Image (cartoon, helix red, strand yellow):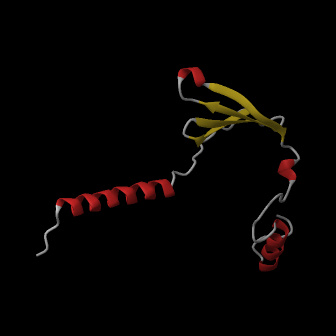
Amino acid sequence: MKKINLTQCLALFSAACVGALAMSLANPEPVRANSGDGGRRYVAVTGNYSPDVALLYVLDQETQHLVVYEARGGASNSHELKLVGARNIELDTQLDGFNDKSDYSHKALERQFLKSGIITEEQ
């Protein structure tokens, strides 16, 4: 039976550590958004953008205005909250597609669904 010396053991351990580190860097955690509280005028949803940055989306359901804020954490002297953007999304929600890289457009899918009977003209 072949013996493994200390140098080989350390090299094997180091390679395993480097491999584990590379795997963790190659597969970052997905961004998750917290659920919003519906049924009220305003809906607010947060999502992590990076380790020290979170985004806050506020939707006014009556006026259909969307506001986005960026919150930065870290050291107590570097906390920051700033307005990123605001928009009236009333017309945006009427679009069937915009900057859409899907394989099928909304119109093409609608034609296929009508042809196959999945949906009818009345729906």
Q: Residue at x 13, y 69 (%)?
A: 3
Among the 4 quarters of the image, the one containing residue 119: bottom right
> Would residue 37 be visible to someone looking at this image?
no
Residue 63 x, y percent position in the rendering? 84, 35
Q: Nearer the viewer, residue 94 or 11?
A: 11
- If the image is split into quadrants, where does the N terminus sit? bottom left
Q: Residue furthest top?
A: 77
> Would residue 7 be visible to someone looking at this image?
yes
Q: Residue furthest left?
A: 1
Q: Is residue 17 above or below residue 107?
A: above
Residue 86 x, y percent position in the rendering? 80, 35
Q: Nearer the viewer, residue 114 or 108?
A: 108
Q: Residue at x 85, y 68 (%)?
A: 107
Q: Is residue 79 left or right of residue 16?
A: right
Looking at the image, how many numbered discs can be counted on the residues? Answer: 0
Residue 46 x, y percent position in the rendering? 62, 38
Residue 78 x, y percent position in the rendering? 59, 24
Q: Nearer the viewer, residue 33 or 119?
A: 33
Q: Is residue 34 above or below residue 10?
A: above
Q: Residue at x 60, y 24 (%)?
A: 79
- If the image is split into quadrants, where does the C terminus sit? bottom right
Among the 4 quarters of the image, the one containing residue 38: top right
Q: Is residue 101 left or right of residue 90?
A: left
Q: Is residue 47 above or below residue 71?
A: below
Q: Residue furthest bottom?
A: 116
Q: Nearer the viewer, residue 75 or 115?
A: 75
